[in-house]
Image: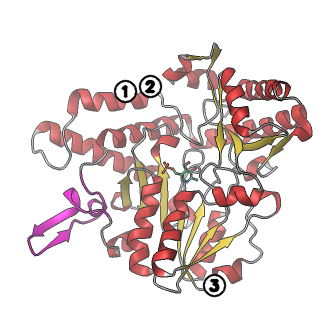
Amino acid sequence: MALDVATIKKDFPIFERVVNGHRLVYLDSASSSQKPRAVLDAMDHLYETSYANTHRGVYVLGQESTALYEGARERVARFINAPSSREVLFAKNVTEAINLVAYSWGRANLSEGDAVLLTEMEHHANLVPWLVLREERGVELRFLPVGDDYQLDLSDLDRLIDGVKLVGVVGISNVLGTLNPLRQLADAAHAAGAVFLVDGAQYTPHIATDVAELGCDFYGFTGHKMLGPTGIGVLWGREELLDAMPAFLTGGEMIRDVRLDGWTPNELPWKFEAGTQPIAEAVGLAAAIDYLEAVGMEAIREHEVSLTAYALRALTERHGDKLTIFGPSEPAARGGVLSFAYDGVHPHDVSQVLDEAGVCVRAGHHCAKPLMRSLGVNASARASLYVYNDADDVTALGDGLAYAADFFAF
Ligand SMILES: Cc1ncc(COP(=O)(O)O)c(C=O)c1O
C-alpha cells in the first residue's frame, strides 16, 4: 500500500515552486496543508458555472449552488460515518466549531460548580472557550496530565472524571503528535454521565474517522489541514444534543420565522448556520475528501507511520543528543508531527536557516502554551508530515539541521 509520493506531488501545483533557489520541502501541514489541483478546480468550477447564494434563489444557478453545498455536507457525513447529514454543521474552522459547543451546549448545560475535563495537551481552540466559561460561570476545569513518553497519564482518570459533564480531548496533539485513546476516554466519559468532545483537527486529515466507532458526542475538524481550503470547518454532533441546543450565531438561514416580537430557529443543520455560508469552501472540502479517499485513508496512515518511524530514526542517528524530539517514541502511537529542540539554537533560528534551503517548518508555541510550559520551553521547531512528503524531505530536514548547527556553533 506504499504511496506513490512522486505522482501525488504532481497533483499539487505549489510543488512546482522554487524557494530560495531550492525545491519546496513543505513540512508544515500540521499548520495548514497544501491544496491539490482537484480542490482548486472544484472551487473554480463552481464560480465559473454555477455560483449564486444558497437556499435563496429559485433560479437554476441558485439551485445548483445549493445542491453543491448540500452535496458537500452529504460527502462530509459519509467521510466521518455520521448517521445523518443533519448532524453535520459547517463552521469557519474547528476553533469556531468548538466555540459553538462551548457557547451553545456549554451555556445551556453548565453552571457554577459543574466540571469539565480537558487535557494538558489541548490546543488553545479547545481550552480558551472553556476558560471563558470558567470565568463567566465558575465552571470547574480539570486536566489530564501528560505522563511517560508524552502520552496522557490516565492513572488518576477515575477521580478526575467523577461527576464531570463534558470531556474534551484532542485526537492527535499538534505539538507532541500523541494519538490519544479516544474510545477508552469516550467510554469513561459516558460511564461518568458526561458528553465526549473531540478536537479532530490533526486526526481527520490523517486517520479514517468514524464518529460512531470513536464514541463521540461532538467532533470538530478543519478543512485547511486536510487538503481543503481555508474558511471551512465542521462540527458533527449527535442529533438529540444539537436539537436541544440554543442557536449560537443568529440571522440569515438559521431562522424559520421572524416577527417584531420574536423569532423561531430553523431545523438542523441550518439552525447553526447564520448568514451566507462558505459555499465554494464547502465544495472545495468535498473535493479534498474525494482526493483523500481516492488515495485511501488507510494507505495515508500507513505511509505516515512508516515515514515518521524513518524520520525519528534518521534524525536521531544523525543528530544524537543535540536533538530533543518532544513526542512518543513509538511511531504507531503518534501522528507525523515532530516537535523538536536543537541544542543551543533557538527554534526561530532553526526555522529561518531551514527556509534558506527551501524547507518550511514552523517555530513557536503552536497555540498550546500550557503544554509548552510543562515541557519547560517557550517554543519548539515543528516539522509535520503529510501525504506529499517522502524520505527525501526528511533528508532535506536533516541536512538543514546540520547546516544550522554549524552556522550557530559557538
Ligand atoms: C489540535 C488543533 N486544534 C485546533 C486547531 C485550530 O485550527 P483552526 O485554526 O483551523 O481553527 C489546530 C490548528 O493548529 C490544531 O492543531
Q: CA distance from mark 2 to mark 1?
A: 6 Å
Q: Position of residue 262 (x, y in %)?
A: 14, 74
In reply to whether residue 64 is colored magenta, the answer given is no
Q: How crowded is the residue under tag 3: few (<14 C-alpha within 10 Å), some, or many (20+)?
A: some
Which residue corresponds to mark 1?
41
**Which numbered disc flags the more N-terminal residue, 3 or 1?**
1
Q: Amino acid at mark 1?
A: Asp
Instruction: Kindly tell me whether residue 269 is visible in this rendering.
Output: yes
Can residue 238 be seen here? The reply is no
Residue 324: x, y in percent? 83, 44
Question: Which is more foreground, mark 2 or mark 3?
Answer: 3
For the residues carrying marks 3 and 1, which lies nearer the camera in this image? 3
- In the image, is the residue at mark 1 within 8 Å of ligand 1 by its beta carbon? no
Report how far apart the C-alphas of labels 2 and 3 lie in the structure: 49 Å
> What is the quadrant of residue 161 in the picture?
bottom right
Q: Would residue 374 appear left or right of 122 to someone viewing this image?
A: right
Q: Amino acid at mark 2?
A: Arg
Q: Nearer the viewer, residue 94 or 209?
A: 94
Q: Is residue 396 above or below residue 375?
A: above
| First to last magenta residue range | 249-275
Some atom of ligand 1 lies within 8 Å of the CB belonging to the residue at label 3: no
**In the foreground, 405 or 19:** 405
Q: Are marks 2 and 1 in contact (CB under 8 Å)?
A: yes
- Residue that label 3 marks: 162
Q: Residue at x 43, y 58 (%)?
A: 97
Does residue 62 appear left or right of residue 385 in this picture? left
Q: What amino acid is at disc 3?
A: Asp
